[in-house]
Amino acid sequence: PELYYVNGSIPSWRVMLALSLKQVPYKATRLRVMTTPKETKSEEFLAINPRGKTPTFVDTDGTVVIESLAILPYLEQHYTSNNSKPLMPEVTRKQEWTREVIRIAERENPHNIYEPIELLYLPDWKLASARIVEAYHDTLAELGFWEKYAKESLFMSGEEFGLADCAFYPILAYMIHRGLGLKKHGFSALQAYVERCEGLTAVREARPEGWEEPGKSLFAKCERLVDKNAGSEE
């Protein structure tokens, strides 16, 4: 199989995590989006995925699967064998299976809530400062739910790293790379969760290229903005 991906992209990272955990050999084809035109908009790639988005998974029989949250269950269905560990509980284990599905669905909440913080990359970000501050507070509030989940089990839906973790962990790791301090905000269970995840060889092997380099500290910039706003209100 072949995976078309963008390095550092949360959706691509999810799929690479699952492939790594399942020990599936595959061809990784990196597409660059900081070029003009973007490689995801090339005629060759659009012939495979007309939406021009990654990740895109092309199976050995020619089956094309797009969208990370469609690829994850596809891999679970078609790449679970004696040599490839399952990442979902058996459907007969109703409570565990339901919890996994719910966590996978919930993963988009922190992703969407955090997104306005990325406006700090824009030259005119000050025009959106109120929206950025709101997103900062909402992100911390949302992480409170995941802190609770992290206290309930070793991983997000049970005692083993599963599809829910493939869906959620890259979001949290991305925020940390952007300067989020978990302990600073009282998220000690999430900090322990991250350490457990990073203790897994398959998780370390699926890291985006260059991830060891520190990212831009958007959260530090947010905190300065929040402090400034608080000072102006006094």
Image (cartoon, rainbow, N blue to C red):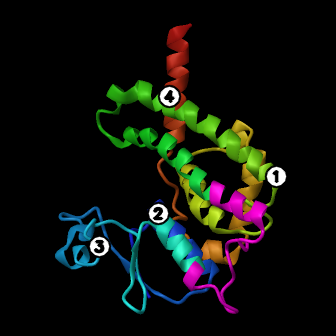
The answer to whether the residues at label 2 and label 1 have Cβ atoms under 8 Å apart is: no
- SS for dot 4: helix
Q: Which mark is residue 89?
A: none
Q: Is residue 96 magenta?
A: yes
What distance separates the C-alpha of mark 2 from that of mark 4? 24 Å
Q: Which residue is mark 1?
A: 152
Does the image show residue 16? Answer: no
Percent position of residue 179, x then y: 56, 46
The residue closer to the viewer here, 172 or 77, is 77
Callout 1: helix, strand or loop?
helix
Residue drawn at (73%, 60%), measured in percent from left and top? 157
- Estimate the spatial distance between the alpha carbons at disc 4 and disc 3, rounded to whole Å: 35 Å
Q: Give the residues drawn in magenta, as a range.
A: 77-102
Q: Residue at 29% of width from left, 37% of height from top?
A: 123
Q: Quadrant of the N terminus?
A: bottom left
Q: Is residue 131 above or below residue 164?
A: above
Q: Is residue 6 above or below residue 129?
A: below
In percent of width and height, residue 142 lies at 62, 39
| The disc label shown at residue 11, or none | 2
Tell me the kind of residue under disc 4. Glu
* Tag of residue 134: 4
